[in-house]
Amino acid sequence: MDLHTLTTDTVDPHERGALLGGRFGGEVRRVSALYLEHFAALGLPATRVRELAERSHEALRQWAPGLAEESDACADAAGVERWQVAAVGARTEILALCPPAGEGECSTAVYAPGGTAPQTVQTWDWHELLVPDALLHELTPAAGRTVKLFTEFGAPAKIGVNSAGLGVHFNILFHRADGEGGGVPVHAVARRILDEADTLDQAAAIAGSARVTASTSLTVVTAEGAASLELSPRGLAVVRPGDDGWLLHTNHFLDPELAAGDVCPGDSSTAERLAHLRKVRDALPGLAPADRASALCGSEGAGAVVCMRPDAAKPPHEQWGTLFTVGLDVAGGALDYAVGTPATAAAQGFSRF
């Protein structure tokens, strides 16, 4: 995965999108085409994808018009049809129409005892074939406010921090109510929280205002603490850290009520990864990013379950790998990141954005 960086200082969403699409038109076109191929491999033809993308994009336009305008301007500047970029932004909503399959994605560990900056680390697990390129984007959603985020080309956000001292981690979830299609993209919910929220309560209010048709956990961290906002079509649940200050999340619901409708794939490693996080968590606080990545692997090292590697025996669209390891410094307004697994990050070190 090649990682690109972009800084935009305009507060105008159309101009921001045009700058993104003009600078990285080739990457935007390539990722859009790869997702269309992926959807087709899962049994969704382009006509169905377009219908779903346009419905979701209209929901986005009603809920956050600036983000819809940014997406359209990016598509126009990149020379690709608007619905194709919208399909990447709504890829979670489109995938919710397919039977849950695969190992899931992402393991997040947050130590937030309150009264001090939280210490965080996350792996991002996904299909490598879909992400030949990814983006680190520093943007200005409003005068006097900055956001730094990591995302795929075409998606408004994934993991990031803002200058108000708030950060967001991202984990996909699966609920039996998913799949209606046409809801507000959960990636846009993450972006709007980064753009607008200063506090956990504000983040929860933004998340709760979106009608979603796919499930996701957004773990929001600030100096006041942390909370996993579990979004689903059945509603929003707020999961707080335990008494020990730890908030751990993989790819199944933690809220008891929403967990009753959990349909995480049977072959997912989500329970195993959560158990691993619980086992290694006491070793994580107080460490530099590379040392924390090493401690995250535990005694298994590169063989740890949080270091997911593709199974070459499976079809390409069923191969999962840990593509990115990242921690949030909400006090410093920065991301500490490395391309690859925590074991790779521990060996090669982290960069700072």
Image (cartoon, grey):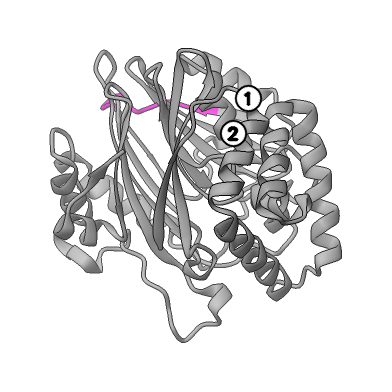
- What is the crowding at mark 2: few (fewer than 14 residues within 10 Å), some, or many (at least 20)? many
Quadrant of image for the N terminus: bottom left
Query: Which segment is the magenta one?
Result: 238-245
Residue 273: image quadrant is bottom left
Could you tell whether 216 is left or right of 331 in the image?
right
Residue 121, how many percent across, how many down?
30, 42
Let me know if residue 239 is in the magenta part: yes
User: Helix, strand or loop at disc 1?
Assistant: loop
Inspect the magenta stretch and tell me whether residue 243 lies in it. Answer: yes
The answer to whether any part of residue 293 appears in the image is yes
What residue is shown at x 16% (from left), y 50% (from top)?
295
Task: Indicate left or right for 189 with 108 as reference.
Answer: right
- Residue 12 is labelled as 1
Name the residue: 13% across, 33% down: 286
Residue sitting at 23 percent across and 49 percent down? 279
Q: What numbered label is drawn on residue 109?
A: none
Residue under circle 2?
A: 16
Determine the main secondary structure of the stretch shown in magenta.
loop
Q: Is residue 23 above or below residue 335?
A: below
Is 62 above or below relative to 50?
above
Q: Is residue 64 visible?
A: no
Badge 1 amino acid: Asp
